[in-house]
Image (cartoon, rainbow, N blue to C red):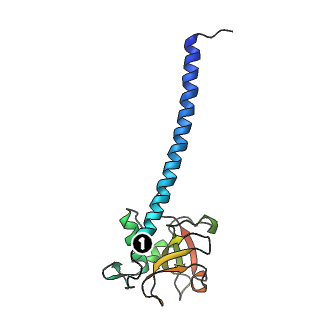
Amino acid sequence: MKFPIYILFATAILVSSFTIKKEDNIIRNQIQEIQTTTDRDSIITYSKQYLGTPYSYAGNNPKKGFDCSGFVNYVFKHFNVSVPRSSSGYKNLGITKKAEDFKIGDVLVFYGYKNKNIVGHVGIICEANGMKSKFIHASSGKAGSVTISALDSEHYTKRFYKCISVMPK
C-alpha cells in the first residue's frame, strides 16, 4: 500500500513534535526542580544571617528582635511567600508531611511547652533528615535568640505537631 508523500511527511512532523514536547516537559520539570531547590537554599542562607538576633516577644524586626513566628514570617516575606504572623495560625495550615519527605525550607510546627492543645512554636528546617532534622528558629529558651536546634532533642520531640511546606508549587 502506498501513502501519498504529504501523509508520510505529516506523520513524521507529528511524531517529532510529540518527542520535542515530551523533552521540553522533562527539561521544564528539571528547571523547576532546580529553582525550587535554589529557592529553598536561598531561604536558609537568608535566615542564617539572623543567627544570634535576640528573642523579643511579638518581635518581627531584626533590629529589635524576633519571636518564633515573627522570624518565620520575616524570612518568608523576603521571598514573597505569605505565612501567618502568629504560631497559632499554623495549626490548620498545609498538609502534614511524612518525616521522610521533610525538605529544607519546610516549616516545623510545635505545641506550646505548657499546653499540648495549642500551637506555640514554629521554625524552618535548615538540615532535612526526617525526625533528626535541624531547624532555625527564634527561641525564648536558653539561647534567647535566633538559633539552630535539633528536632530529635527531647524538648522538641515531645512538642512536635507537624511539618508543612509553605513554598509555592
Residue shown at 62%/11% (left/top)? 3
Residue 85's x, y, as percent? 39, 73
Residue shown at 50%/45% (left/top)? 28
Q: Is residue 143 above or below residue 135?
A: below
In which image quadrant can residue 50 be found?
A: bottom left
In which image quadrant can residue 12 be found?
A: top right
Residue shown at 53%/47% (left/top)? 29
Q: How many marks?
A: 1
Given the image, on which type of amino acid does mark 1 rest? Ser
Query: Which SS class for mark 1?
Result: helix
Q: Is residue 11 left or right of residue 88?
A: right
Quick one: which residue is furthest to the bottom in this view? 142
Q: Is residue 86 left or right of residue 91?
A: left
Front position in the image: 34 or 11: 34
Residue 55's x, y, as percent? 39, 85
Q: Is residue 29 left or right of residue 42?
A: right
Quick one: which residue is furthest to the left in this view? 63
Q: Is residue 158 above or below residue 21?
A: below
Packing grade of label 1 (10 A; few <14, some 14-19, many >=20) is many
Front position in the image: 113 or 18: 18
Q: Which residue is mark 1?
A: 47
Q: Is residue 85 above or below residue 52?
A: above
Front position in the image: 163 or 20: 20
Front position in the image: 46 or 158: 46
Quadrant for the N terminus, please.
top right
Residue 149's x, y, as percent? 53, 80
Residue 9's x, y, as percent? 55, 17
